[in-house]
Amino acid sequence: MPVVDHVFVFCDRDAPEQRHLAAAGLRVGVQREHRGQGTANVCFGFRDAYLELLWLADEAGAREVMVKPLGLQERARWRHTRASPFGVCLRPGAAGEPTPFVAWPYRPAYLPAGTSIAMASNSGVIGEPLLFAVDRPFQPFGVPHALADRGLAAVAVTVPDLAPMSLLRELSVPGLQIRDGGEHLLELTLADAQGRRLDLRPHLPVVLVS
């Protein structure tokens, strides 16, 4: 079965929201710019997955022919467009495992030549989370912080007005729940959670339970 590799949420430019995660003891493990895609990020790693804060750094890059179908400009302005600010990336649970959704090959400029990302066929439905998959194993960031050795036990994504025939309703991934609701929300629950809640609202629609 596939598993969650990482999740992202669109934030403000340069991710000022990261200070709330830092105050809870988390540290940035990776930060990069996605050349040719128009985005940049900071990432917080756990034992087997990571949380990515993503922002639009280059409008022109987001309008590239390969990139535009992802709706990144609309997703980055989710507070005004009602687009989903979230993305969910899967990876195989075992070598050779097929992607669990209909996909198209996404080949942005920042990827090594000859490689691609499996982008779900609903990528243009901006009201739904961007769903995609990679075929590489997870490599921990190796940056120590208060929750770095905790696995990601559950991911719940709330989607307003989720279409009755949405492919997300058919998705079966351990620990991943896509549900209807009144507003966009991402809830991450770490393994061995003791009920401590880091609620980033109103800055970001994210709740981390540890």
Image: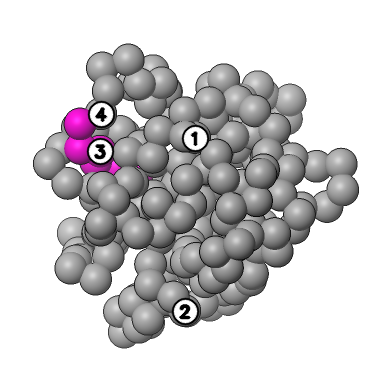
Magenta part mainly helix, strand or loop?
strand
Q: Please tell me the numbered disc located at residue 162.
A: 4
Question: Residue at coordinates 25% horizontally, 58% vertically from top-left?
Answer: 79
Sequence order check: which comes first, mark 1 or mark 4? 1
Asked whether the viewer can see residue 169, the reply is: yes
Is there CB contact under 8 Å for labels 4 and 3? Answer: yes
Comparing 42 with 34, the one in front is 34
Query: Where does label 3 land, which residue?
Result: 159
Question: Residue at coordinates 24% horizontally, 71% vertically from top-left?
Answer: 203
* Percent position of residue 143, x then y: 58, 76
State the separation of the CA atoms marked 2 and 3: 26 Å
Query: Where does label 2 land, which residue?
Result: 14
Sequence order check: which comes first, mark 3 or mark 1? 1
Indicate the amino acid at tag 4.
Leu
Seen as rendered, the residue at the extreme right is 113
State the separation of the CA atoms marked 4 and 3: 6 Å
Query: Callout 3: helix, strand or loop?
Result: strand
Indicate the amino acid at tag 2.
Asp
Residue interval drawn in magenta: 154-161
Comparing 210 with 63, the one in front is 63
* Percent position of residue 138, x then y: 64, 51
Sequence order check: which comes first, mark 2 or mark 4? 2
